[in-house]
Amino acid sequence: MKRILALVLVLFAFPALAQPVTFPKDTVTVETASGAKHKFNVELATTPPQISQGLMFRRQMAADAGMLFLFDPHPAVFWMKNTYIPLDMIFIGTDGRILNIAERTIPLTETPVPATGMTRAVLEVNGGTAARLGIKPGDRVRHAQLP
């Protein structure tokens, strides 16, 4: 964790050293308690540079798109620095179930947005998507790298 923090600090302190970050693409499915299945086309953020950049500097995102952050379990905290799109942050526990959802996060803020428990992944989608689709804590997120 200390190495990730050090890398993030270097990338922000010396942006000229940072190389353009690319993200592999995949799909993720959210299964709700009512039995609905919602598929999202996501970009994967698994490396420190990908995780630190996330969706920063994007001006738009397709309705069925998102970003899936995957990391070793820890008490995750995100923020919206340099992020222009209002997002729903879906925090996913070690069992693949949704812990909590930070809905319609405010763009361009550094206010910490925490998970309510040990987090294995975070799915970011357009703000309002979770409410529109009935996605709630306890629902299951399916991806090859989640249980």
Image (spheres, rainbow, N blue to C red):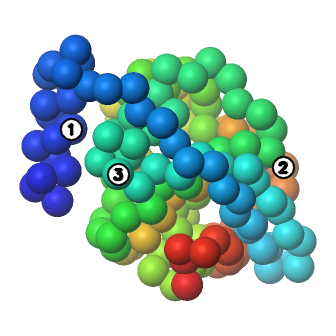
SS state under label 2: helix
Residue 143 visible at all: yes
> Left or right: where does residue 100 sit relative to residue 136?
left
Q: Report the disc number at residue 8.
A: 1
Q: Residues within 10 Å of mark 2 (few under 14, many from 20)?
A: few
Mark-to-mark CA distance, 2 and 3: 31 Å
Say what amino acid the circle numbered 2 marks. Answer: Arg
Q: Residue at x 23, y 18 (%)?
A: 15
Residue on which disc 3 sits: 47
84 lies above or below 89: above
- First in sequence, mark 2 or 1: give its number: 1
Residue pointed to by mark 2: 132
Q: Residue at x 41, y 55 (%)?
A: 46
* Rendered location of residue 57, percent (x, y): 49, 20
In front: label 1 or label 3 = 3
Among the 4 quarters of the image, the one containing residue 36? bottom right
- Measure how far apart labels 2 and 1 are at the Cα level: 34 Å
Which quadrant of the figure contains the C terminus?
bottom right
- Residue 142, how many percent across, how many down? 67, 74
Label 1 Cα neighbours within 10 Å, binned few <14 / some 14-19 / many ≥20: some
